[in-house]
Image (cartoon, rainbow, N blue to C red):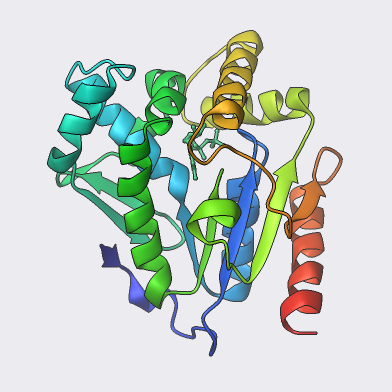
Amino acid sequence: MGFFFDLYPTMPEKKVIIAIDGYSACGKSTLAKDLARSLNIRYLDSGSLYRAITLFCIQHVIHPEDIKSVVAALPFIHLNLSLGENIKLTMNNEDITDEIRKTDVSRWVSEVSVISEVRNKVNEILRGLGKTNSLVMDGRDIGTVVFPNADLKFFVTADVNIRTLRRQKELEALGRQITLQHVKENLLHRDNLDSTRMDSPLSKAEDAIIIDNTNLNREEQLELALDWYNSSLNG
Ligand code: CDP
């Protein structure tokens, strides 16, 4: 794993892990990045690793539902994450930061994420990073499985139509024109697979704080999360 240590000159004295879980495109990553910046710690997007493995399968014509072949490919996938304000993800030395956001990857990532061997590979990387670093990490099972002892856990939700609009805007910013209907179908498809899979389904950790940001803007959701941080960890 590579790091940009110089981006974060003053780390908190005590190591802090903040877990943010929730549905597709509910604003987890925006909140996680904003929190990381405010607290001067690193941000890690666990979904990007699942997306990378999915991209590898697509590139090598491995069907994501062909579990045996996906598992056989895992030793050939070398992932490297540079953490910081702008995360850079490389796979076998190739920068795939933007490519993992493509529609094909979004279409199949939840099928790949069902596979336990895939989850084990990703979790090993995530836990390794959490051993020595303060982190804000977002995903589906961070507070329940990856870091069950996280210092603070959030479960983020938002109305599906709002999530659809936000994701479409994000994709537009990347130069991709996708219909609202198509975006919504993808979110619902992934939410369904993510919540019903056998291994580490998306669910709220018992001790997670729910943030419904349907009617909150970016600043308001950050303020709310920081209030929780201050009262839970600094109070
Ligand atoms: O950005 P968005 O919320 O749409 O998705 P993402 O965070 O990039 O995650 C992509 C997919 O990876 C999810 O739909 C899940 O299938 C899977 N994932 C997971 O299974 N566990 C995680 N901790 C993170 C992502």
In the rendered image, the vertical position of residue 163 relative to residue 11, given as above or below: above
Q: Outermost residue toward the right?
A: 215
Q: Is residue 22 visible?
A: yes
* Quadrant into which the N terminus falls: bottom left
Is residue 98 visible in the rendered image? The answer is no
Residue 227 at x, y percent in the picture: 81, 70
Q: Depth check: 6 or 17 in front?
A: 17
Left or right: 201 as drawn, with respect to 76? right
Q: Is 163 positioned to the left or the right of 200 in the image?
A: right
Height in image: 23 above or below 31?
Answer: above
The answer to which quarter of the image holds residue 81 is bottom left
Q: Residue at x 44, y 83 (%)?
A: 9
Q: Looking at the picture, how far across and down is residue 168, in whole percent?
A: 61, 24
Q: Is residue 24 left or right of residue 94?
A: right
Q: Residue 185 falls in which quadrant of the image?
A: top right
Q: Residue at x 16, y 21 (%)?
A: 60
Is 94 on the left-hand or right-hand side of 127?
left
- From this view, report whether residue 90 is shown above or below residue 153: above
Residue 66 locus on image (x, y percent):
27, 17
Residue at 18%, 47% (x, y): give it.
78
- How many dots with numbers? 0
